Image (cartoon, rainbow, N blue to C red):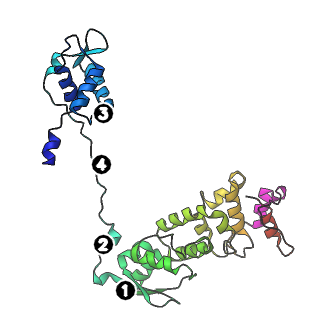
Amino acid sequence: MAETQKKNVPTTWEKVREALLISKYSKGTTRSHIYKSIGDAHPSTSVASVRRIIATAFNDGRLVHGKSNARFLLTRKGRKVNREKKKSVAKKPKKKTTPPPLLIEDTKTDIVYVGIEGQPGKIVTSKRMVSYCSQTLKNMIEGDGGTNSISVRLPCTESIQFITMYLMSGNIDCSLPCVNPNNFVSVLRNAECLMLHDEVFTALARLFRKHQREIIRGQTFNADYFSKEALERLLPEKFDTMIKDMKHHAKIWQATLLYWCRNSENNNVEISFDSLINALHLKEFTVSPKSHIVSDSDSESDVALKTFTF
């Protein structure tokens, strides 16, 4: 019943046409008379819609001016009964909701058990999921003749929950309690060890830029804990490119490289901390009120970092 009533509702032009037809003024009907006539017959009609349809009718020849510009007359075209075509709104195509290949249910023969040394129990997942998430675990499975049980040793245990969830579902949840600025290096080291998918490093890079100042000041943020390759995943450019043109980069990125090179005993670091200090002329900087207070027990590198404001 409601649908039938909706279909019988006249269009705005039909309301204007009806008001002009019932008008007794042969020299033309005024705008106010049209509004009043429509308001009496169809109280819910908006004035703006009537104003727009009158302007449109002038453009397409359905209306002309009467004796004066304030009066309106119907033309032969306007008198014809022709329902106004409603503009068809193109429907937005629905987004495909098909699950990604990783989340398709696997057969029992595809189940794999991943054990982490020092942790009770094993992660139950699929070979397809493991092969996608971790290149290291994929190589271990293929190298052992397609075994369904493997064990791995991770460098850090603080971010086990993040690794477990990712290997089981493929979901990257950076809101977990274990994924915080204090444990950031732990997550990065485990991701590097397992050679996780690029999407993980992309998510970590976003998290790093959000808490960059806090993360780089951590004691584990240096070359002894993670490699230059892992650091490059966080940088806006390649490590070597940034070193060559370091003075032209933002202070926060200069500080990132300085903190990573500090007190490092890693022989793989191709550039020394002292050379970075000389390249930036740190003696020109003064101690900021917001920076840490330099103490007598600080090493030369600590003093240099604390006098570098960013």
Q: Is residue 272 above or below residue 286?
A: below
Is residue 243 in view?
no
Cα–Cα gap, marks 2 and 4:
27 Å
Q: Quickly name the residue at label 4.
A: 92
Which mark is drawn over residue 46?
3
Dot 2 falls on a residue whose secondary structure is loop
Q: Is residue 175 left or right of residue 103?
A: right
Amino acid under label 2?
Answer: Ile
In the displayed orientation, state which residue is furthest to the right: 296
Q: Position of residue 6 (x, y in %)?
A: 17, 42
Q: Earlier in the sequence, mark 4 or mark 3?
A: 3
Q: Is residue 41 above or below residue 163?
A: above
Tag in front: 4 or 1: 4
**Would you say residue 283 sits in the magenta stretch?**
yes
Q: Quickly name the residue at label 2.
A: 104
Cα–Cα gap, marks 4 and 1:
45 Å
Amino acid under label 4?
Answer: Lys
State the residue at coordinates (28%, 28%).
Answer: 50
**Would you say residue 167 sits in the magenta stretch?**
no
State the residue at coordinates (28%, 26%).
Answer: 35
* Segment colored magenta: 272-292
Q: Earlier in the sequence, mark 1 or mark 3?
A: 3
Q: Quickly name the residue at label 1.
A: 148
